[in-house]
Image (spheres, rainbow, N blue to C red):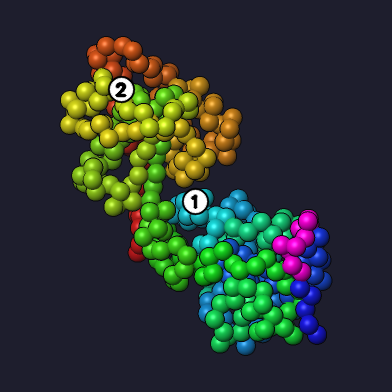
Amino acid sequence: MAPLVIDTTAADDPRDAVHRAVQALVEGKVVVLPTETVYIAAASALNERAVDRLLALRGGVLEGPATLAVRSVEDVLDYVPELPAIGQRLARRCWPGPVTLQLADAQPESVIQRLSPRVRAIVAPEGQIRLRVPAHELVLRVLRLLAGPLVMIGARRETDSDSVTAQEVLARLADRVDLILDEGRAKFAQRSSIVRVDQAGFEMVRHGVFSETNLRRLASWMAVMVCTGNTCRSPMAEMLLRKRLADKLGLSLEQLDDHGIVVMSAGISAAPGGRAAAEAIGVMRERGLDLTPHESQPLSDRLVRFADLILTMTRGHRDAILTQWPDAEPRTYLISQGRGDVSDPIGGPTDLYRRCAEQIDAYLAEWIERIELPQLGQK
């Protein structure tokens, strides 16, 4: 029997298509959904028979675990409560998006243990699971309305290339799926990158949208120093922390990025593209540090989401960040660790900037003992 095909691009309101997909999945049907990478065939992880039908599309054999699509980064902790630090960074920075994380399923409190043994054998063979948050609003809407995760594989037979249009799916799987949501050609028209992550680092399992170089950069440890205008305090803090980290690791400043260490600065009320204050440049020059290339930038969603550590010069800066980005609370600290604010030297003499830098550096000397830099990059 031919599947129902819904052209979501022709609908004024996609909610009907979403509700039909959810109903079909709850009833144990196999549904084809568009993603930003390729078209995927999906079944509810709570329905063993539907997952078996999914597996049959590939002749009963998959290359590795079937992927579980989940709703958000926060949901991942239900599956891997002790997510490695690099996994946390990649999830926070890549999701929703075309990256699939492969992780060890060795935690008894994981919700994977609540799935049937048959489904676990398909999604967690040999103690490994694959998780992804697709960057496609239709899929995310479906996930929000389902009680459990989706099991998904590429919508193709074992000998086919990837399906990047609904028409390709229909030609290949016409009598083997129940519903196809058609949203035109997939954005990237290539597979997601699969990355195996553990406490020791990461390695590429399958190349896809993100290259190895992209992922190495995204796996870097990142600190962001924050003040108001990003012309005095936070740029000096950025340079001073870079110097201390380089010394700790026995590297030059230029080698930090290549070793997966990124330090940046930003301002709560900064205008983009401004130079550092001349006095700040001079004080850093006294320490052998070059602040002349600095350009101010406002604190952004992306910086906050990417940061592993955010150090603010004042309580007011920290409060402003947590008001706008409450999820950043576990990663956002006052640089003085509660001993007062670092005053703004703007407009003051060079000696005031010098004392400000000394104060910041003294605080960073304490932070450098607290910062645990994991092993970074590829294994």
Q: Position of residue 33 (x, y in %)?
A: 68, 68
Is 110 inside the magenta-drawn segment?
no
Q: Earlier in the sequence, mark 1 or mark 2?
A: 1
Q: Where is residue 110 shown, x and y percent of the image?
A: 61, 60
Is 314 placed above or below 126 here?
A: above
Which of 335/366 is in front?
335
User: At 56% from the left edge and 77% from the top edge, which residue is drawn?
Assistant: 162
- Taking the spot 51% from the left edge, 62% from the top edge, the residue there is 99
Q: Amino acid at mark 1?
A: Arg
Q: Is residue 37 visible?
A: yes
Q: Which residues are magenta?
A: 6-15
Count neighbours of disc 2 (C-alpha within 10 A) and say few if under 14, some if 14 to 19, many if 20 or more.
many
Query: Could you tell me which secondary element the residue under label 1 belongs to?
Result: helix
Q: Secondary structure at mark 2?
A: loop
**Image quarter of residue 358:** top left
Kind of residue indicated by mark 2: Ala
Residue pointed to by mark 1: 93
Residue at coordinates 53% horizontally, 62% vertically from top-left? 98
> What residue is disc 2 on?
277
**Residue 67 visible in the current orientation:** no
Which quadrant is home to the N terminus? bottom right
| Vertical order, 371 against 340 (above or below) | below
